[in-house]
Amino acid sequence: MAGSGTHEASRGGDLAGWLRLAQTPGVGPETGRRLLAAFGLPENIFAAGLPSLQTIVSERIAQALCQPPTEAAATLIEQTLAWAAAGGNQVLTLADADYPASLLEIPDPPLILYVKGRLELLARPAVAVVGSRNASAQGALNAEQFSQALSQVGYTIISGLALGIDAAAHRGALQAADGGGSTVAVIGTGADLVYPARNRALAHQIAAEGCIVSEYPLGTPAIAANFPRRNRLISGLARAVLVVEAAAQSGSLITARMAAEQGRDVLAIPGSIHAPLSRGCHQLIKQGAKLVESAQDVLEELQHLPLPVPALASEAATPGGAAGLPASQLLEAMGFDPVTPDLLAARCALDAATLAGLLLTLELQGQVELMPGGSYRRLV
């Protein structure tokens, strides 16, 4: 036991040094990485002395590094160490093996990540789904259904826990039968806070079944400037960014721009030429974003990326397995006119959950499509 305690104390000491570095006035991700490159781990930075530090940073920052933490910083470090020791919480530094490899590819990875929930989700292939906070009913439905379909076949859904499209994307991922709550919320406040308050229940569900990530210290309130900056982490954690709805001037376009700069694919769902919330997506498509109309389109776009794309349908997921209804019989019951799920459930004597799973698999196979308003139409 004594050995274990010493090990834990050592780890705590290392983390305390990282927290102190990140909270030093003037030290952001870029400056922090320069210091780490020059001196190694944080304890070496604090032991370097003023003359050596001034070869890397300004005199003001060098002097701050030579001073002990302020009382407020010391209190925050202790609170963070206690938070990290609680079940389900993690504080990752650039030196940790669990730090997401995808973020190491972007120009300005955070020195520290605060993680609440399933850490392993940060290592899985992911798609970011973003869009307007003032989403239309159809836009929210699209975000939910695309996210559910992508999560169903193994992708983690990344979004920002905002109202509208973000919340719908998280809900859809959490509803995936085989996704296991595969969603990550990248937030612009401290990981111990929930913003907006209307998403409190959703945030608690994500923390329990998915993962919440922040680069901001505990207790950081909702500050407007932090949200555009956190968007680089939403795109950085993903292999592609899907914009569902966006006005011509939208924060989602910032995420899309950052994604392109990071070498991620940008995808967009088109809409009516008369709808203000379609203009941002149409603008992205004009600039080279991939136009997608179904989850199948997204999966096909991901085929060229280096990580393997999960299989679209296994034997267990093929209609006719657990449900006992062959695909041909379900398609025959649909006919060739659009049909609502309620009517189709009545025709086939299926419960809503079973039918939804069958329709989702058929949609992924390109045999049916979801139409505006929620009806389905067969394509074969």
Image: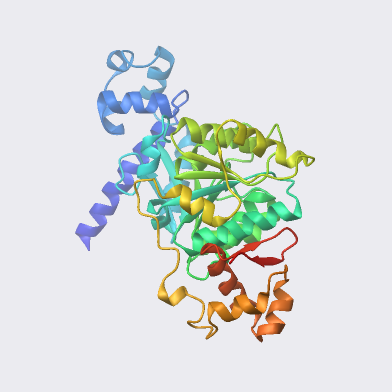
- Residue 173 at least partly seen: no
What residue is rendered at 49% in x and 48% in y? Answer: 213
Above/below status of 370 relative to 101: below
What residue is rendered at 50% in x and 36% in y? Answer: 259
What residue is rendered at 74% in x and 46% in y? Answer: 134
Q: Position of residue 96 (x, y in %)?
A: 31, 45
For this orientation, the residue located farthest to the right is 274
Q: Position of residue 65 (x, y in %)?
A: 38, 24
Quarter of the image that includes the N terminus? bottom left
- Residue 307 at least partly seen: yes
Q: Which of these two is toward me, 153 or 96?
A: 153
Above/below status of 20 relative to 122: above
Position of 318 with respect to 142 (left or right) is left
Q: Position of residue 123 (x, y in %)?
A: 37, 52
Above/below status of 161 relative to 349: above
Q: Which of these two is toward me, 140 or 362?
A: 362
Q: For residue 350, what is the image quadrant?
A: bottom right
Q: Position of residue 115 (x, y in %)?
A: 46, 51
- Disc count in the image? 0
Position of 3 with respect to 60 (left or right) is left
